[in-house]
Amino acid sequence: MRLFLFDIDGTLVSVRGAGRAAFAVALKETYGTDGAIDRYDFRGRTDLSIVHELMTAAGLDAERIRAGVDACFRAYVRELTRLIGDGSTVKLMPGVAEIVRRLDARSDAVVGLLTGNIEAGARIKLEPTRLWPLFRVGAYGGDDADRRRLPAIACARARGLGHDFTFDRVTIIGDTPLDVECARSCGAVAVAVATGQHAADELATCRPDLLFGDLSDVDGVVAHLTGVTP
């Protein structure tokens, strides 16, 4: 039995900048500034770290930032819902829908999420794809600012479903060096896919266990993920 944990942005879908735009509105509404959001690197960051890093750099003290986080996320969810709308702006990455469905259908696999998105944001982005119900566990960017702590949270939630996974039975799939670092930090299998904003040669320098340009070769990807050489 393996636990497969997927990142969202750049790995499963692209929402074409909706997250950054929603954050800009939410931060201004909550804290009076969105800081240097236009220059901030969102790739692989958790939503909690985005708020804290942007607002700290803007000169706000830690207590004020913490006090406003819940209101900021409420405003973010409202704006993200408006921007996503009917879901037509959500673009599924090649092959991912079939891969998630095939893994979900296996008796030796549990499919979940490990994402920088807060849970409500993850749902908004994935519900238009109709994949949301297939992710049985999740660890989210509202659970901890440090992505490296999320695998333990996902495993704890899997135990709540009756599945006890050691980290060597966990596979983390993402599109950034921080996803690879997250897997390495706990001893999980690291799978990198170059469908986000990091090229394959850049991801290769992180030495993931598996590296794909994209996930369009569904048979081959599933075979590799489940440990069978095609």
Image (spheres, rainbow, N blue to C red):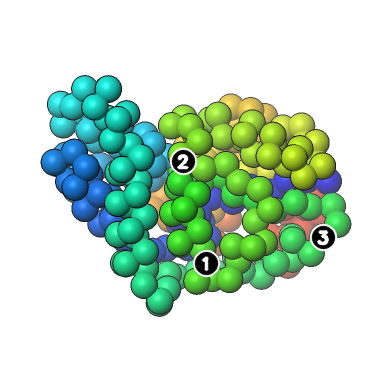
Residue type of the residue flagged with mark 1: Glu
- The picture places residue 137, in percent across and down from the top left corner, at 66, 48
Q: Which residue position holds label 1?
A: 127
In the rendered image, the vertical position of residue 150 relative to residue 80, given as above or below:
above
Q: Earlier in the sequence, mark 3 or mark 2?
A: 3
Residue type of the residue flagged with mark 3: Arg
**Which residue corresponds to the image point at 74% horizontal and 60% vertical from the top-left?**
103
| Disc 3 to disc 1, C-alpha distance | 22 Å
In contact (CB < 8 Å): disc 3 and disc 1: no
**Which residue corresponds to the image point at 42% horizontal and 39% vertical from the top-left?**
46
Which one is in front, 92 or 22?
A: 22
For the residue labelled by badge 3, is the local secondary structure a helix, a strand or a loop?
A: loop
Question: Residue 141 has which mark?
Answer: 2
Q: Which residue position holds label 3?
A: 106
Which one is in front, 148 or 154?
A: 154
**Which residue corresponds to the image point at 17% horizontal and 46% vertical from the top-left?**
28
